[in-house]
Amino acid sequence: MIDHFRFMAPLYDAVLGRPGVDWWKKVLRLPVSGWVLDVGGGTGRVSAALPDLAAGVAVCDVSRPMLARTQYKNGIRPIQAPAEALPFPDAVFHRALVVDALHHFRDQRRAISELARVLAPGGRLVVEEPDIGLVVVRAVALMERLALMGSRFHPPETIAGMMAAAGLRPRIERRAQFRAWISGDKDDVNSLSDGE
C-alpha cells in the first residue's frame, strides 16, 4: 500500500493552514484541567494551539513521518499507534478530537469505541469530517479512492450513530465549509440520578 502521508508530511501544515482556535475552544469546551488526545492528528496542526488550554496534549497517529513534524511544536507528546488500538488505560483523557481523519481509519466503529473507552466521565469527543452529502466532497472521496487511499466517508448522522453505539451522547454541532463537526459526550457518573 502507498504511504501517501510520507509524501504529504513536509507540506501538510503549509497547505492546510492554521485552524480556527476559537472554534476548537468552543466545541471542545476548553480550557480543561485534564489531557487532550488528538487521534489521527498527524503533524499536530490543530492540537498545536491547545497545550495552554489543557494539562497536556497527546497526538496519536500511525504515520511516523507525520508525527515527526510534531517535534517543531511545543507541548505535544507524539505517540505512534492505530486509532483502533489506543495504547492508553481507560478514562484518562478529558477531551479528544479527530480532525479530517476518521475516513482514513481502517475500522471506524472500533476507533470510536476506543476513543470512548479512553475518555474520562464528563469528557467530550469531537470529530470533524468532510460532509459526504455535498457534491464537492463526493468528488474528493472519488479522487482518494482512485489514489488508493482506502478512505471511507460517512454522513454526520452515521458518525453520530457510531458515537451513540459506543456509549456517547452525540450531537451534530455544525455544518459549514464542506465539513461537519460531530460531538459525543461521555456521561459523568456523578451527574446520573440514583434511579439510573
Image: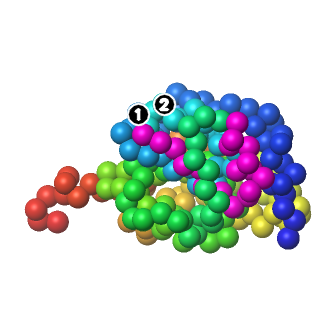
Relative to 116, 71 lies left or right: right
Up-down: is 10 above or below 170? above
Residue 162 in view, yes or no: no
Where residue 85 appears, x then y in whole percent? 56, 70
Q: Residue drawn at (31%, 56%), measured in percent from left and top?
A: 121
| Along the line of sight, the residue nearer the viewer: 188 or 51 | 51
Label 1 to label 2: alpha-carbon separation = 8 Å
Residue 160 in view, yes or no: yes
Q: Which residue does the numbered mark 2 point to in the structure image?
A: 52
Quadrant where the C terminus lies?
bottom left
Numbered disc 1: secondary structure = loop
Q: Amino acid at mark 2?
A: Asp
Could you tell me if the residues under marks 1 and 2 are in contact, i.e. CB atoms within 8 Å? Answer: yes
Numbered disc 2: secondary structure = helix
Q: Quadrant of residue 55?
A: top left
Q: Which residue does the numbered mark 1 point to in the structure image?
A: 31
| Along the line of sight, the residue nearer the viewer: 23 or 176 | 23
Relative to 168, 56 lies left or right: right
| Along the line of sight, the residue nearer the viewer: 174 or 87 | 87
Q: Residue drawn at (79%, 42%), measured in percent from left and top?
A: 12
Up-down: is 119 above or below 19? below
Q: Amino acid at mark 1?
A: Pro
Q: Magenta stretch: give its range.
A: 55-72
Q: Nearer the viewer, mark 1 or mark 2?
A: 2
